[in-house]
Image (cartoon, rainbow, N blue to C red):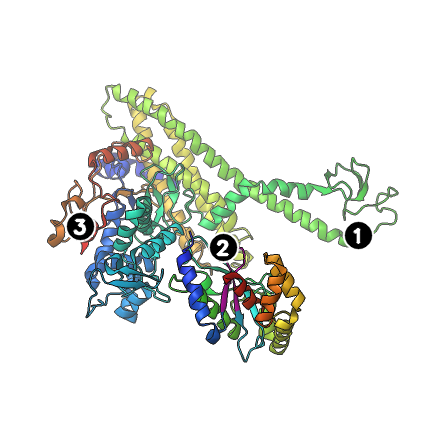
Amino acid sequence: MEDCLGSDDEYYYSDQDSLDGIENEDSDPQWIPPKGTTTKVITKESLLSAQKEDLRRVMDLLFLREHHARTLLIHYRWDVEKLFAVLVEKGKPCLFSEAGVTLVEHEDLDPPLPNSPVMCAICIEDVPSVDTTKMDCGHCFCNSCWTEHFVVKINEGQSKRIRCMAHKCNAICDESVVRNLVSKRHPHLAEKFDRFLLESYIEDNKRVKWCPSTPHCGNAIRVEDDEFCEIECTCGLQFCFSCLSQAHSPCSCLMWELWAKKCRDESETVNWITVHTKPCPKCHKPVEKNGGCNLVSCICGQAFCWLCGGATGRDHTWSSIAGHSCGRYKEDKEQNAERAKRDLYRYMHYHNRYKAHTDSFKLESNLKESIQKKVAVSEEKDSRLRDFSWVNNGLSRLFRSRRVLSYSYPFAFYMFGEELFKDEMTKEEREIKQHLFEDQQQQLEENVEKLSKFLEAPFDDYKENEVMDIRMQVINLSAITDTLCQKMYDCIESDLLGSLQLGIHNIAPYKSKGIEKASELTVCWVNKANNADKDPRLHCGTSGGSTEPEQPSGSGSSDESGCSSRKRARKGALGGGFFDLNLPAEVIDKSDS
Amino acid sequence: MVDFARVQKELQECSRDVERSGIKVSPKGDGSLARLIGTIPGPTGTPYEGGTFQIDIALPDAYPFEPPKMKFTTKVWHPNISSQSGAICLDILKDQWSPALTLKTALLSVQALLSAPQPDDPQDAVVAQQYLKDYQTFVGTARYWTETFAKKSSLGIEEKVQKLVEMGFPEGQARTTLEAVGGDENLALEKLCSG
């Protein structure tokens, strides 16, 4: 790596075009996903249109009304592929009956007159048939019994699957009937019902999760296919989509969970106490041996044997305690103590490095401000060097590489330790792999430190040729650390974790441009042309179609404050044209029938 | 609020059919229809045959939209019924309840449970273990418990009178009513309540 630094200098310097290619990596602040749609932020406002696409697919394929499609999707946890697979495998009737969807119309040959009484089997009263409702499954009960049933179920938190009242009838009640009847007597509950239905898209869907921010920003994140990824919500929080804790790659979720716990609960302090002290058999206080023979006396006055911890008398020689013999266990105990000591030192080694890099990361965050000042000063100068984007790019690269570096230590702690993979590798294998990994880690470390050093240089005081030199170094080192990070992830994914028997350790892939920022979903309705004009109220003010919102944003990739203000701006721009959850049922129904 | 109109109708319906089904439901005695006592005969061909089992019924406010709470007050040896508390493990008393079910149909299901234990979904692990590993002993124990706790003869007439007195009926009236129905305390209770 050292070599390529020196020899490539000339190359980069002479070729302005390729240079731009490298340094412009961050000039576009918005992460543009390769396929156009990947990770999306779903806000309260866009929640409904987020589900539209899935609903539409199911409705179109099976010629269903929206509420039936929703019932199916809730049953299959919004996994459209799974739903289609069941359709192919078991057929339509089975698909529907499992989910509680009944499509058969129960035509009454002899419909009762509106005022002729019908006996409701629930309250066992005669009610005029106008006051009864027949569900799709054909079961008919009086409206007040239906309402009571819905109220009880909604209060139980079962809004998403309210079954018909008839015994052993698996049919799910038509959501518009529920909404209608409940809203007449309990408008608040009807709202709750609607919210539960809508939020099913988040709660029951493995591709969608609430942003874990506290206080909660109200957003949910939808990923396209890989749940092992790291995301930045528009609220600015970066997190691991899989475990919802802070972004921690290249640690796997399990490794990170263990590490965080280890660091949190001071288990190593406890470890120290086990290694260096023994509890007094009388008062149970931990006693530290400060030298001398194996007869120890506690401050409470109790004498005991240091080797076995048992209470003894006070008569002793250097090698034995009168009437006491525990020599047999000596070796074992000492081995355990040695082991605990070794584990402790091992943990300390990794923890120190992890912490050092985390601390550097924090310190370097302050660097940002001072660097901006230096850039401002330099730009004032009358020099032929006008473009200082390499400074910001180098800084972003430094932050990213530093992150990778600090999390690579807990990774190594578990990867080459005995806690997780004791039986997965032989000792020799482990050593080889560890060396391989540590070489890479060391290389990355060296280059990250160099990059940090150059960025901290007071280049605003330098002469032009010196600045050019620093610029070259920063650009070069940025490219190198990026490549090294990528290589380290590759090594972890294919050589280390990839060779394990248990496939439970997955890591989010390396993103050269930093943690992916989820973009807001466009609030629009991709309705069919034939019913697009039915209810204009359902169409929001924004443009139709599924194009991405181009969000003008001047903030850099690591500028967190920029995101929230952008979000507010967007909300304002959209105005009040969102779908109103409290819209009467008929309006909602009309639009999708 | 419990739909008492419906409960009243259920009780009438149930007593109309008592000869055939053997299933009785009557108010517990404090006059409220929210606390009831159900009685089911042990099914024939089972270790529970010949026994009469009492079930305590508490109706939740949202009845019939929530299931009634039922538990055995007669001690019974059965994999799906707690030998300690009488708690019943039956799906229709939990998530499979439907408002279209009634106290009578629920009690019929409990009776059916006595005929067909489901040891794989046990309420009482000890009984379930015995049922699976040593069926003969299970049958013996269940039969012994039926003899001891579920037979009418197990209560003397004086005890029955005492029980009714505790429920708040005058002693003389309790005694005559008991004699009139041939010593069946449930029938006596029903009679006392209705009259």
Is residue A366 one of those drawn in magenta?
A: no
Q: Which mark is residue A327?
A: 1
Within the image, what quadrant is residue A286 found in? Answer: top right
Q: Is residue A6 visible?
A: no
| Residue A8 image position (x, y, % from top left) | 31, 39
Question: Which amino acid, mark 1?
Answer: Gly
Query: What is the C-alpha distance between the residues marked 1 and 2?
Result: 76 Å
Q: Is residue B16 above or below residue B65?
A: below
Which circle, 1 or 2, is nearer the viewer?
A: 2
Chain on which label 3 sits: A
| Residue A467 image position (x, y, % from top left) | 31, 26
Task: Describe the element under mark 2 as helix, strand or loop.
Answer: loop
- Could you tell me if the residues under marks 3 and 2 are in contact, i.e. CB atoms within 8 Å? no
Question: Which amino acid, mark 3?
Answer: Val
Q: Which range is magenta?
A: B24-39
Query: What is the C-alpha distance between the residues marked 3 and 1?
Result: 81 Å
Do discs 1 and 2 belong to a common subunit? no
- Could you tell me if the residues under marks 3 and 1 are in contact, i.e. CB atoms within 8 Å? no
Q: Which mark is residue B32?
A: 2
Task: Describe the element under mark 3 as helix, strand or loop.
Answer: loop
In this rendered view, identify the residue nearer to me: A56 or B118.
B118
In this rendered view, identify the residue nearer to me: B169 or A215.
B169
Which circle, 3 or 2, is nearer the viewer?
A: 2
Q: In the displayed image of the protein, which residue is found farthest to the bottom? A: B45
| Residue A459 image position (x, y, % from top left) | 34, 24
